[in-house]
Image (spheres, rainbow, N blue to C red):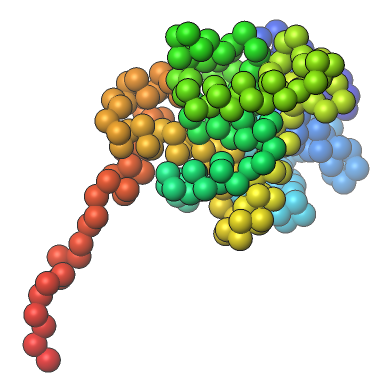
Amino acid sequence: MNHYLEQIDDILSFGGRSPRTIISYKTYAAPFLEYCVNHFHKDPAEVSSAEIRTYLRILQKERNLCDASVNHAISEIRFLYEAVLGIEWNPKQIPHRKIKRCLPYVPDRDAVETFISSISDLKKKAMICLLYSSGLRISEVCRLKCSDIEHSKERIYVAPSKNGKDRYTLLAEESYEILCEYWLSLPAEKKSRDWLFTQQTNLLKPIYPQFIQDFIKKQECLLGWQPRLTAHSFRHGFATHCYQDGMDLLTLSKLLGHSSINSTTIYVHLAELGMRHYNSPMKGMVICQ
């Protein structure tokens, strides 16, 4: 079945997809191909829609996948059938699962300040500061280069990432000071000529996103907080608090690097929850007993 995976590589690389995206596309396609051989004893071209549904149910149960992850699996298997096998996909036979849309958790300003102030490690503190003060994605923070920091213009250059577009975002003076403190604390042999945040054992490679994700969880535990924060929570905080302070949606959308302003409108709802105090229409009523 390796030739099918090689075709996925070839198609996606021809389309200009990043190596990370190519790996992502095979997260569920590769185990599915293996399951076809070992359990269905068939080539994937011969597997029925009912058998694919069976596989997806087993996959969800064994891996304890949420509905969103199951939908990712469906999309990857669909790509395999349509792009590689040339077989028409019937979405009525294998529909995407319905997902309950919930507003993301947004830490308030006091929580952000408390969290950042509690960090003693300058490298981790600098990374969290950039997540919140500039609204960067964790992958963007990890791949920042020294030359991307433009202090004189109070901005950060963000290289093409999720949607293939580059942009500029804000550089807070407070973040810059932490960055300088972090950089000056590094011994000369630990300073990369390229990446701002490198792996511990390899200065030629940028740090892994999981490094800061794991730290956030540990720090929450240390603070005795309920585990709700992720690296993306600080990006949500940046966007929500900027909107609360009067930033227009078009500017905010550009700073966040959204492909469509529709993705930015969620912060209208998140900000309103924090801007206004709503009372029940029954408040103040004198109820006779």
Residue 138, position in %: x, y? 61, 30
Report the side of 56 relative to 262 (left or right). Answer: right
Residue shown at the point (69%, 50%) measured from the top left: 218
Which quadrant would residue 267 be assigned to in this image?
A: top left
Relative depth, front residue between 7 and 190: 190
Residue shown at the point (56%, 43%) measured from the top left: 117
Report the side of 115 relative to 249 (left or right). Answer: right
Relative depth, front residue between 153 and 240: 153
Relative depth, front residue between 74 and 236: 236
| Residue 8 makes an appearance in the image | no
Q: Is residue 18 above or below residue 69?
A: above
| Residue 155 makes an appearance in the image | yes
Residue 155, position in %: x, y? 47, 14
Residue 52, position in %: x, y? 71, 43
Residue 235, position in %: x, y? 50, 34
Report the side of 168 relative to 289 (left or right). Answer: right
Quadrant position of the N terminus in the picture? top right
Q: Is residue 1 above or below residue 210?
A: above
